[in-house]
Image (cartoon, rainbow, N blue to C red):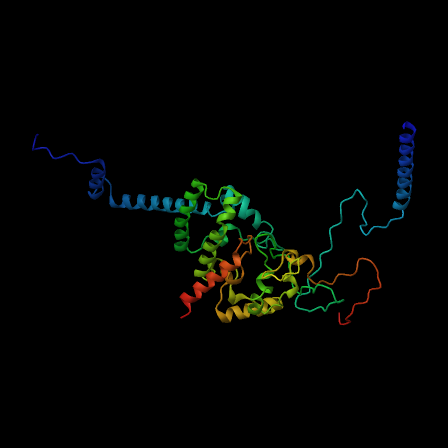
């Protein structure tokens, strides 16, 4: 063995040492300009690609969504109404603020895994899982004080006098008691799972035990 | 034997012919509530605004109470009955909604059950939203209460 030659570096180590060395060829200005341009391109590209996954068309490109939840959503108030303003899948199911959006998108990679595994690829499997999936969404809404609802429906902009009597009374109570939209408005855009009311009661009990003294 | 069969066949033919003759005669006089031609599609039903918050009394003793709110968005199926979410005890106390009559818990053998019985499960079959709809045909019915 020749002791003079240094042991040969791996490819990754070579690349790393290249990154650590200052360049002798490019000016700092060129690096900054190119880096800035490339940064704008990649950041814009990233957000554009992510926004593409935030469309109704993307959601219903999977039959699990198209044949179950989307079919039920059709015709509900958020899909068709007198003024034609719509709230589509991502308006309720993906947060708007960037940090929470990324967090939800990372969680959604689990949904891609289950798409591959075929966890809910038949109606029967979907119905079997439905209560659990619904509970995930109810919990998420409860924890964020129904943030996605309130993007459009804000308590502070409610004109109670223009609501129906029953709604006036209940909304007034809800504001006083610090309730959140999902406490009452479950199954607004989708059908409820079997056992929804018992699950609701259990959820409220655990929530109240944890949050009210 | 052959003549007997012939006689029966002729008798049937005569009776059928008579029935056909009279029924076509009557058909010309029938005035159906459905005022479109037989081969035309139904007219769309009128849409009435639900009278929310006003209480209508029963017009006769056995009348299922009317519902003073819209019911079209409530799910009633094998999985869930959203009416029960407010009107079944103990929700009815919590939501301050009228409680379902105890008669709805009696099954067809007369045994009282703990949940609303299947034969009373589809609420909207009897309880409809109250609207200002005029009677389809003129009639002499007098409601028992006059404050309507």
Q: Residue at x 34, y 44 (%)?
A: A38
Left or right: A52 in relation to B85: left
Nearer to us in this view, A157 or B32:
B32
Residue A2 percent across, percent down from the top left: 8, 30
Above or below B50: residue B12: above
- Asked if residue B20 is positioned above or below residue A138 in the image, the reply reads above
Seen in the picture, residue B117 relative to A74 is either above or below; the reply is: below
Q: Quadrant of residue B91?
A: bottom right
Whether residue A28 is visible = yes
Residue reaching furthest front?
Answer: B1
x, y percent for residue B44: 73, 51
Whole-percent x, y for residue B148 in the image: 75, 69
Please tell me which residue lies in front, A185 or B142: B142
Which quarter of the rendering shows the N terminus of chain B? top right
Q: Judge from the rendering whether residue A172 lies leftward or rightward of residue B31; answer left or right.
A: left
A152 and A19: which is toward the camera = A152
Q: Is residue A151 visible?
A: no
Q: Nearer the viewer, residue B82 or A77?
A: B82
Residue B39 quadrant: top right
Residue that appears at 59% across and 57% down = B81
In the image, what residue occupies the spot 63% across and 58% down? B117
Residue placed farthest to the top in the image? B2
């Amino acid at each position: 063995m020749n002791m003079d030659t240094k042991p040969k570096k791996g490819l990754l180590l070579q690349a790393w040492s290249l990154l650590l060395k200052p360049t002798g060829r490019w000016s700092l200005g060129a690096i900054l300009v190119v880096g800035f341009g490339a940064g704008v391109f990649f950041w814009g590209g990233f957000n554009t690609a992510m926004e593409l996954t935030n469309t109704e068309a993307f959601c219903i490109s999977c039959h699990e969504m198209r044949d179950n939840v989307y079919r039920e959503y059709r015709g509900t108030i958020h899909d068709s109404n007198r003024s034609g303003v719509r709230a589509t899948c991502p308006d309720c199911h993906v947060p708007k603020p960037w940090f929470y959006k990324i967090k939800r998108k990372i969680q959604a990679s689990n949904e891609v895994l289950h798409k591959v595994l075929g966890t809910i690829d038949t109606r029967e499997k979907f119905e079997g899982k439905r209560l659990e999936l619904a509970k995930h969404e109810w919990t998420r809404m409860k924890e964020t004080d129904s943030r996605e609802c309130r993007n459009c429906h804000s308590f502070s902009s409610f004109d109670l006098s223009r609501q129906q009597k029953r709604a006036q009374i209940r909304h007034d109570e809800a504001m006083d008691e610090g309730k959140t939209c999902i406490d009452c408005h479950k199954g607004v855009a989708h059908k409820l799972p079997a056992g929804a009311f018992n699950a609701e009661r259990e959820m409220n009990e655990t929530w109240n035990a944890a949050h009210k003294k | 034997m052959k003549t007997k069969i012939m006689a029966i066949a002729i008798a049937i033919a005569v009776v059928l012919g008579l029935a056909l003759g009279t029924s076509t005669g009557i058909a010309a006089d029938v005035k159906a509530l459905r005022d479109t031609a037989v081969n035309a599609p139904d007219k769309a039903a009128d849409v009435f605004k639900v009278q929310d918050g006003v209480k209508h009394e029963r017009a006769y003793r056995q009348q299922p109470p009317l519902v003073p709110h819209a019911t079209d968005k409530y799910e009633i199926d094998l999985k869930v009955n959203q009416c029960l979410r407010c009107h079944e005890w103990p929700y009815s106390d919590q939501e301050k909604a009228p409680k379902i009559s105890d008669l709805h818990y009696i099954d067809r053998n007369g045994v009282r059950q703990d949940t609303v019985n299947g034969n009373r499960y589809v609420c909207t079959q009897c309880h409809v939203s109250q609207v200002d709809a005029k009677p389809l045909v003129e009639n002499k019915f007098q409601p028992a209460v006059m404050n309507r």
